[in-house]
Image: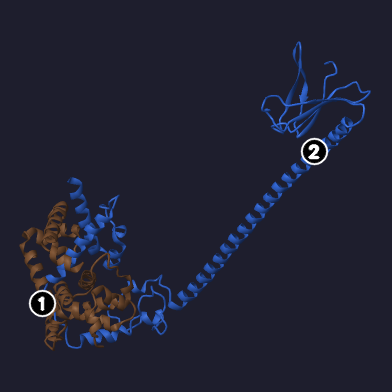
Amino acid sequence: VTESIDREDQAILAALAALEAEAPDEALREGWSGAPGPWKAPNWTEGDETLRRLYVETLGLLGYAGEPGVPRAGARERLLAALGERVRKVEEPEEPGAEVVPLAARRTSAGDPSGDGDEQAAGEVPPRRRSWAGRLAALAAALLLGAALAAVWLSLELQGARDALTRLEAERTDLAERLSRQEALIRRGGQIGEMIAAVATPGVDVCPLHPMGDPPLVPGAYAVLYMPPGSGKWYLLASNLEPAEGVYMVWLDTPGGALPAGVLSAGTESVLELDPARP
Amino acid sequence: VATTPTLRAAGDAALVRAVSQGSREAVGELYDRFAPMLLGLARRVVQDPGDAEEVVQEAFLHLWSRASGYDPARSSVATWLALVTRSRAIDRVRNRNVVGRAHAAAQRESEGAHASGDGSARVLDSERRRRVRAELASLPEEQRRVLELGFYSGLTQREIAQRTGIPLGTVKTRTLLAMKKLRAALRAEIRELL
């Protein structure tokens, strides 16, 4: 409750600040941020601003406390005629046909009974100069926008080139791997071809091997054990092993037990030179 | 410059927007709506009908040149104009010696009068005036005094304290109490302005 009371007091003080401002309309427009004073709240909220608005309106109602005045005859017409002698503060874009009076003329205008210091501030820029400044600002903005668009376009192009380069590099690597595999296959194919030719040579001792199991564990598998004439070496030619890319340990089943005979490398058709020490 | 029926039906904020776009007719319509109230306020501050009239003219010339700065979220048009008029009137009191001109001014006032505003608006203003006066009168004397010195005489709270010999803290307390009571009592009138 204490806090809410404090905040209400602060809202009232903020509203009263508009009374002490030199330009109350600007103080109203700036809202709390423009209100000076020791009551400046650190966490001014929308609710506080609403409360301030209510108190501002309370102050505005005090204008109704006096006896209403009756404007003298012709006061309204004089006011409307005086409007033409006044130049609107140029905050909005220039309108075609809008009256533009030089600043010097405004300062010496006899039709200005108010002596408005605020409307003739030293820092005020004449409309024409403001117009050039506006055009320069627009040109600079257009150049900046163009540069930003060009940068974006170049960035996109660069990214596209990088992507293409990466894709080409991947394709080159893939092609190299395929070439390498093909060369290996050709080399192995050559060896196998020689071996098959050797198996088919008359006088070669050939011993076909059949897959084990019924039905066979690997139905398409086939192997031949052979010894080329005069070589004194046994070779094992195996084909359709599964998995085809595996590495197999070859065992010789002897009456004395299984004996290791070497390693058969992967391939649909592979040849292993058996250990000559084995029978 | 006559006021068209369309402008007559427009809201206050819409009229200020039209003024910001260069509509003199909108200024005329706003003048019809608010000049009586603003004249009453200005006269109470400057104590001179002629000066009051000039102050009101200045306020509307200010509106003409600064209409684009009006923010309807911050205040109603009535309050905006009232505060501008009050500020101009207090400046006039401070800058010129208006004492001694009251007699001549009163004579000028008798030269003729301009009827402004339509009937319904005058009735609304009359009722609003009655309520504000009644609530202001119902405030405790010491609270009403500090409020009036601040609003109509343009004194800061420190100046009120110096002039009346009341401690500054007491001036603030009385002002806060008066504002709270007025806001509570004039709730309906405030709602009309929003």
When asked about the image quadrant of residue A259, the answer is top right
When asked about the image quadrant of residue A33, the answer is bottom left
* Residue positioned 24% across, 55% down in the render: A48
- Location of residue B35 in the rendering, given as x and y in whole percent from the top left corner: 19, 78
Q: Quadrant of the C terminus of chain B?
A: bottom left
Side (left or right) of B139 relative to A9: left
* Residue positioned 22% across, 81% down in the render: B8
Side (left or right) of B162 relative to A168: left
In 3D space, how far apart are the residues under numbered discs 1 and 2 (Cα atoms)? 108 Å
Identify the amino acid type marked 1.
Val
Instruction: Residue at the far top: name it.
Output: A256
Coloration mode: by chain
Q: Which structural element holds mark 2?
A: helix
Q: Which structural element holds mark 1?
A: helix
Q: Eyeballing the image, is A48 above or below B149?
A: above
* Residue positioned 29% across, 68% down in the render: B71
| Residue matched to label 2 | A185
Identify the amino acid type marked 2.
Leu
Q: Nearer the viewer, residue A235 or A79?
A: A235
* Residue positioned 27% across, 68% down in the render: B72
Q: Nearer the viewer, residue A264 or B116?
A: A264
Instruction: Residue at the far right: name it.
Output: A230
Label 1 lies in what chain? Answer: B
| Residue matched to label 1 | B123
- For chain B, the rendered hue is brown
- For chain A, the rendered hue is blue
Q: Share a chain, discs 1 and 2?
A: no
Q: Quadrant of the N terminus of chain B?
A: bottom left
- Location of residue A93 in the rendering, given as x and y in whole percent from the top left corner: 41, 75
Q: Is residue B51 visible?
A: no
Foreground mark, 1 or 2, reads: 2
